[in-house]
Image (cartoon, helix red, strand yellow):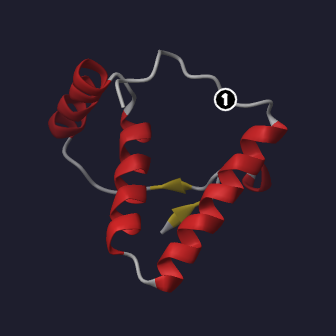
Amino acid sequence: MATENPENAKHTPWRKFRLPTPLWEAYGSICARVLGRERSEDLVEHVRSLVAEHGNAEELAKLKQAAQELEERRARKGGRPRKTPPAAE
């Protein structure tokens, strides 16, 4: 279920899910310490990887559409620089 941002047309919709606070905090510190990125980056990468690995033709088309949407949004903003250098890839 998407919760729309106040500036819906300009931003990716927010997503809500339930997770105990201690688990969310532990996940955040592990993402920062081990992966060198924020939780949101890790979650997006996990979802992309899962769809890329297991998606059918329709789901892969949606993955491609989503990648294009993000690319267009970032191009309008002049790109989105990372807060920290990327983790070893």
Q: Residues within 10 Å of mark 1 (few under 14, many from 20)?
A: few
What residue is at 33 percent from the left and 67 percent from the top?
53
* Residue sticking out furthest to the right: 76
The residue type indicated by label 1 comes to Arg
Which sits in the foreground, 43 or 79? 79
Q: Is residue 32 left or right of residue 48?
A: left
On screen, residue 18 above or below 55 = above
Indicate the secondary structure of the residue bearing disc 1.
loop
**Which residue is rendered at x = 34% and y = 22% of the image?**
36
Q: Residue furthest front?
A: 89
Work out whether 67 lies above or below 60: above
**Would residue 6 be visible to someone looking at this image?**
no
| Most distant residue in the top direction | 84
Residue 39: percent from the left, percent from the top? 36, 36
Quadrant showing the C terminus? top left
Depth check, front residue: 17 or 70: 70
Q: Position of residue 21 (x, y in %)?
A: 21, 38
Q: Residue at x 43, y 49 (%)?
A: 44
Quadrant of residue 68 in the image? bottom right
Q: Position of residue 22 (x, y in %)?
A: 16, 34
Percent position of residue 62, x then y? 57, 73
Which quarter of the figure has residue 38? Answer: top left
62 is higher (above) or lower (below) than 35: below
Residue at the spot of label 1: 80
- In front of the other: 29 or 80: 80
Tell me if residue 77 can be seen: yes
Kindly identify the residue that appears in the image at 80 percent across and 34 percent down.
Answer: 77
Tally the numbered discs: 1
